[in-house]
Amino acid sequence: MRPAWIRTRVVLFTVAMCAPMLRLSAQSATVPGGADTLLDGGTLNDVWIHINARDWQSLHTNYQEGTYYPVDFEWQGNRIRNAGIRVRGNTTRSDHKPSFRIDFNRYVDGQDLFGLKALVLNNSWHDASMLHDDLSMLLFRAMGIPAPRQAHVRLYVGAGREYAGVYVISEEVSKTFLTANFGDDAGYLYEFHRQDGDNYGFQEQPDLGWYIPRFGPKTHETDSVANLYTPIRTLVEAVNEARQDNLEDRLGDYLDVNVFITELAVQNFLAQTDGLVGGVGMNNFYLYRFAGKRLSMLIPWDQDNAFSRVDVPPSENMGTNVLSSKIWDEPKYRARYLTRLLDVADLVGNGWFEQEAARQFEQVRQAAYEDPLTPYSRDDFDQANALVQQFARERGDVVRQYVASIAPGLLNGRPRSLRLQRRRPE
Amino acid sequence: MLAMLCAGAVPASAQVQLTFDKHPAIDFGNAFTASVRVKSQNDWRDFPPEAGANEKNVFDPYRERIAVEGKVMGRVLYHVEREFHDTSSPWKNIYVDARVVHGLHLRGGQFNMPFGLDQTTSLMDQDFNYHSLAGSFLAPGRSPGVMTYGDFFEKNALAYEAGVFSHDGDNARSAQLTDVRVAPTFAGRVTVKPFSRWGALHFARSMETAVAFTDGVLPAGLYNLKGQTVPGDAFVQKVYVNGRRQRLGVQMQWRPGPVGIQAEAMRVRDTRFGQGIEDEDLSDLVERAWYVSGTWLVTGEHKKETITPARPFLNGGYGAVEVGSRVEQLSVGAGPPLNPAVYGPRSRYVLPTGDVVWTTGVNWYLNKFFELSLNVIREDRALPRTTTLLPGPVWSRTFRIEFGL
């Protein structure tokens, strides 16, 4: 019989030798494709959150707070220990089926899951189909706009591995995202937080303090207010001062007008009611200012309110935003915008968008039926998906007819489909 | 008001005396006495700039307290004390105390639990500007409760204190709980002066040693004890605990003539029942701290709780000058050092952290009211990679002007 102190040291030594594997297993290639496999939507993945029962209860009771709780995150046998989880969301925040943010390096410095420092699990609270966000991001990326990768997962929770429903797993717009999409993460990234009562659309705001609650810094968080917000105010001034017939002259250094037009085109093609030109002003985007430059870009986020109606005119709400107004009112830019709308229509016109909607529906259908926490019935889910597929099938023609009605010349000589991208762009 | 009411109840023949020796006092004969104590400590601090640390003001009004204490009917002692810079819990020691029989006193109210020599020494009688890490973070501090205490044999050769308190002391995070029912904590201390009756060992007569404990229920949550650097930044990882908290401490004090030597060691054990990620029990969390300090009154006065200069400044002398040094350590957690992923709030292992602090200082007692203190402090910190605090050596300097009435 070994003395107790020898046994203790043997156990400690063994743990010390084996412990690194706990983390390395998550980062090494035990899953071909790594994070891509989790986020490409090719299969319906299962993820398992190991969490203390008391924390799971507290997380629901205090769902309005942003308190983190420790969890182990497991996917395909890879277990990331000591990650942090908190409830997230604004209007979708719920104690019945909360959305979550999982932060892999909350408690362990530098920990990640195949390069992802954090993941978001969205509850699709406002979207009975569960597909709006994922399909929208897919279309943004197909049109060349960087947007977070998303997929559906079945979520299991706790020591008993209880099924907690279907979630949309999404990469965060973070430094990792910036590096992957721009090769640079040294710039200034802000998450836009719409304030109640706002109907904001690039109207000038001389007080820097106005920007503080609306543009939450995600990088350079400790910089001074002047460093963080003067460039945003300058960008807004440039939007307002730019001449309608030559936006680039004043605005070109601050915003790529063509990229903004493409973003408008995608969102309005998707009949998004809560985006850059939604009914309540600008919402659901990040702003990234590139390192060492004045140039910024808007990055889309949370497109649950897309696919609102197939017959929404793609000019709706263009007048609610200073920049979109100038684009719409100036024939040169309106033509560009309508052309990009046609590009989107052509892109989805070959049927891949509808096929993708149908594929995702089939992929998640059974899991959604069995979802114990969704607020929607099976019929709600089926009907919402039928509308999504109808939208994907018919929206291109609606948009084309609209463009033909106000600018028939733009359709002349245009091929039926540009075939810009097929299926998933990644 | 209380004095006036009591005065009304005092026979006209009672003699009313107003005195001002060290502090203003009023006596209504044996019926009621009251004296006012004022304590003021103001610091000028020089801390190193550290990324991620809260900004600290150079000037720190460390303590501004007023207290009223006295006796009622010659038997019941009372004490009421308020701090003006602590808005969250301004009332400090508030208690009544009475001797029942020889060797048996009773005290009730809010006061320091009998654990930790440094923690239970009045802030005006500290040898250094800051409490020790052990006294600040592992000792419980004050709590509402009742306590019995007394001593036996000649010259207090054996003394005891034992009490039950409503929570774990105001140094513990759980003391701030308002929505969780916290069960009582028991505390006790036995102090021995082994040589107090030995006339032949004159130099050793002041030596005393004690052993103390606390034992209480610990609510489930992130309630392990705190640990902060000298500038006040937290370095101990918050972890979930549940079950019981037990403290064990030993202390020693010896004051031969102008020299003072003092040491303490304490260990705190928190259980963590059902606190793992999978609801499993976790191994106990153990926090340890110790210190050894020595002081020397260069001007020759005898070391006592309160130093009164033999030749006050501007009154025929230079006051009293004392030099001293203290070394101490606080350490928390243990586990394999190779992989940070094994440490977490609900992990078996708790991130090992610690702080070793050397404090060297000089105290200049100008008279019985004023004292100036200068401390130079060096820290060597054992910190996780995640923190942006400096690991050490980190140097701090504090200068204090103290006024006591």
Image (tube, helix red, strand yellow):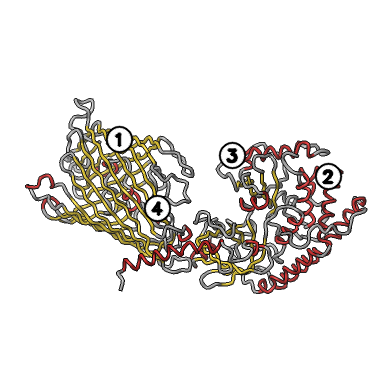
In the picture of the structure, the residue carrying the numbered disc 4 is B353
In the picture of the structure, the residue carrying the numbered disc 2 is A333
Number of the front mark, 2 or 4 = 4
Return the x and y of residue B297 as percentages of the image width and height.
20, 36
For the residues beneath circles 2 and 4, the answer to whether they share a chain is no
* Mark 3 → mark 1, Cα distance in angstroms: 40 Å
* Mark 3 → mark 4, Cα distance in angstroms: 34 Å
Relative placement, left or right, of A58 versus B376 is right
* Mark 1 → mark 4, Cα distance in angstroms: 30 Å
In the picture of the structure, the residue carrying the numbered disc 1 is B373
Other-residue count near label 4 (Cα within 10 Å), few / some / many at <14 / 14–19 / ≥20: some
Image quarter where the N terminus of chain A lies is bottom left
Return the x and y of residue A375 as percentages of the image width and height.
65, 68
Q: Earlier in the sequence, mark 1 or mark 4?
A: 4
Quadrant in the rendering for residue A374? bottom right
Residue lying at the far left in this picture: please name it: B200
